Amino acid sequence: MSENEHIPDSAVIAATPGQLKKTIVMVGMMGAGKTAVGRALAARLGVPFLDSDHEIETAANMTIPEIFERDGEPFFREKETQVIARLLKEERGVLSTGGGAFLAQRNRDLITDDGVSVWLDASLGVLWNRVRHKDTRPLLRTADPRATLNALYDARVPLYAKADLAVVSDGVSSIETMVDKVLEALKQRPDVLDWK
């Protein structure tokens, strides 16, 4: 008799995620929930959670806004690419990227080669509600942050749409519900995740 024979069938969850074969890379606008959903997804899968912005801040011993102010956005974007490449090679897990990371073709190529991109697609209204009271977004430190967010949204959405998978982030679903939605989308990609 095996260890699991005493467990009734009703207690076994259908389509439980199994072994991760590629890193899941969360992409999308600031405020879309990449970090919160990514962290919860990693916990659900029992894999490491990686955050490219956090890794950059740790390496520089500075915050992202401080890096932008001291070294400029082009310097930050170069470091971002280096960190994403390193994280994709070092360890399989769930990787949350900064809002601008997926805009660069070289980053999209890296992610396509070594992972799967999941776009958390949130509306402009949802994003604005989440970011408007925070001073941690260097790109929104403008005279009219709402107009800036709108311009960023319009410019970036066509590039986010190139992601392998898209999951709508409606602003009302719980983090756990969002994780369920991401896992449902990942069923389309058996090359990324084995299902028990």
Image: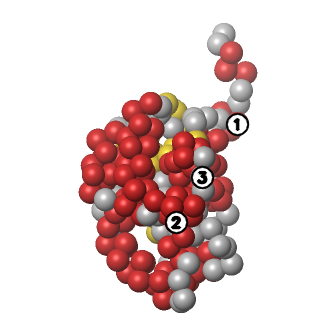
**Distance Cα–Cα, label 1 vs label 2:** 54 Å
Viewer-nearest residue: 6 or 143: 143
**Distance Cα–Cα, label 3 vs label 2:** 11 Å
Q: Is residue 183 visible?
A: no
**Label 3 is placed on what type of residue?**
Met
Neighbourhood count class around disc 1 (C-alpha, 10 Å): few under 14, some 14–19, many 20 upward: few
Query: Relative to 33, is 7 on the left or the right?
Result: right
Q: Residue at x 71, y 30 (%)?
A: 8
Q: Are marks 1 and 3 in contact (CB under 8 Å)?
A: no
Viewer-nearest residue: 147 or 114: 147
Which element type, helix, strand or loop, lies under badge 3?
A: loop
Of mark 1 and mark 2, the one earlier in the sequence is 1
Numbered mark located on residue 69 in the image: 2
Which element type, helix, strand or loop, lies under badge 2?
A: helix
Q: Position of residue 99 (x, y in %)?
A: 47, 63
Q: Are marks 3 and 2 in contact (CB under 8 Å)?
A: no
Query: Relative to 117, is 129 on the left or the right?
Result: right
Viewer-nearest residue: 181 or 5: 181
**Label 1 is placed on what type of residue?**
Ala
Above/below status of 22 relative to 170: above
Q: Position of residue 9 (x, y in %)?
A: 65, 33
- Farthest front residue in view: 70
**Label 2 is placed on what type of residue?**
Glu
Of mark 3 and mark 2, the one earlier in the sequence is 3
| Residue 72, picture quadrant | bottom left
Q: Closer to the observer: label 1 or label 2?
A: 2
Which element type, helix, strand or loop, lies under badge 1?
A: helix
Q: Residue at x 48, y 68 (%)?
A: 29
Residue on which disc 1 sits? 11
Above/below status of 184 relative to 12: below
Residue on which disc 3 sits? 62
